[in-house]
Image (cartoon, helix red, strand yellow):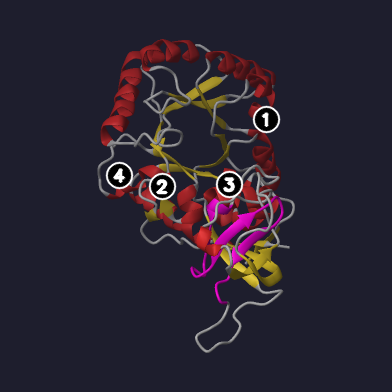
Amino acid sequence: MAELLIATKKIQNNIKYLSKYFKANNIHWSLVTKVFSGDKEFLKHVLTDDIIEKIDSVGDSRLTSLKNLKEVNPGMRTIYIKPPAKMYADDIIKYADISLNSSFTTIIALNEAALKASKIHQIIIMVELGELREGVKRTELMSFYEKVFQLSNINIIGIGSNLGCMYGVEPTYDKLLQLSLYKELISAKFNKDLKYVSGGTSITLPLVENNTIPKDINHFRIGEAVFFGISPLDNKQFKELSIDAFEFTANIIELEEKKIIPDGIISDGNIGHSAEFDKEDITGTAIKAILDFGLLDVDQNDIDFIDTSLEYVGITSDMLVIDLGKNKTKEGVQRYKIGDKIHFKPNYMAVARLLNSKFIDKMYV
């Protein structure tokens, strides 16, 4: 089987590095583990006690993942990082210590569930700052907070926003300053102290480094930077974080010299696409290899060859075809043979899909 290799020590070192970095900048942070979809083996390997103690909370966007977090470590402080569905209010109270919210109807349901469970549930209210994803409209924010402050078993601990995820609206100083000002207005009007101004994600890290972030932005929700060592703002390595914690390897299950252009009438393939070829390739051949994974496991656009001389040819549900070129070294020795592995560097979406595929082995190294 193809394998996803996971370097746990590199991930743990990234967590430790960011914990020190945020502490030096007076910032709280939540580790977002949704790329791992609640995989218990990952949680056991990476989230050891010495790692957890350096993080404010661990978050996910799936209830099953939060359940697994609590099963692995019942004392772990958890945060549900998207507005919950009203029908799952009881489960949110059971598995999440904190949740991000933007619907008053849902918050009422959370209050009722918390009352039944004899708990006080903490929430961060999200405000819409232009990304047009989750968030209370700015014109309704003050009245929204006023209503929630009256609920018996809900404790508002902050205000937050989401930027850069759906439309790529950048978290600029001016955008985040709006969030900071709303915090000040709410604190002044209701005489309430909001502990968290949650405006930071991996995309916001360069603003901290460049000292161009409002001082009140004191809570970050970080996933991609921990696992891939980059900020999505520029897709560059952030400071000293490891960028190679994951490697995907697949096995060569066939290797033959074949024609470049298929023989026959070409129509749409069974996965919904047709191929295009250059006319000059009509008599040409290439040494092609078939690998043991396909679109059911990962999108080929989300993985890059580590050997840059290789080229993608085509994909089906469970096999990938690549062009090996002449498959010879400068000395004329065969480079690849049946049974050899081809190595890829996966991106965030690739790792998320590979971890969810039951046909891919996961190896912790």
Q: CA distance from mark 4 to mark 2?
A: 12 Å
Q: Seen in the image, is 249 located left or right of residue 218?
A: right
**Badge 1 vs badge 3, beta-carbon distance below 8 Å:** no
User: In terms of depth relative to the viewer, which is nearer, 289 or 238?
Assistant: 289
Label 4 amino acid? Leu
Could you tell me which residue is drawn at 69 percent across and 54 percent down? 264
Would you name the residue on which mark 1 appears? 94
- Give how far across and how far down residue 112 sits, in percent: 64, 15
Residue 43 in magenta stretch: no
| Residue marked by disc 4 | 207
Q: Is residue 307 magenta?
A: yes
User: Of the residues shown, which amino acid type is indicated by label 1?
Assistant: Lys
The residue singled out by tag 3 in the image is: 35
Q: In the image, is 132 to the left or to the right of 311? A: left
Q: Please tell me whether mark 4 or mark 3 is closer to you in this view.
A: 3
Rendering coords of residue 68 (x, y %): 69, 43
**What residue is drawn where x is 69% and y is 67%?**
251
Query: Which of the two labelled residues, at mark 3 and mark 2, occupies the earlier sequence position?
Result: 3
Front of the two marks 4 and 1 = 4
Q: Residues within 10 Å of mark 1 (few under 14, many from 20)?
A: some
Residue 26 visible in the displayed image: yes
In the rendered image, residue 325, in percent from the top left (x then y), is placed at 55, 72
Residue range corresponding to the magenta coloring: 300-326
Q: Foreground: 68 or 272?
A: 272
**Which three-letter amino acid code belongs to the residue tagged 2?**
Pro
Q: Choose the circle earlier in sequence order: 1 or 3.
A: 3
Is 319 positioned to the left or the right of 11 in the image? right
User: Which label number is shown at residue 232?
Assistant: 2
As drawn, 44 above or below 333:
above
Residue 202 placement: quadrant: top left
Front disc: 2 or 1: 2
- CA–CA distance between discs 1 and 3? 22 Å
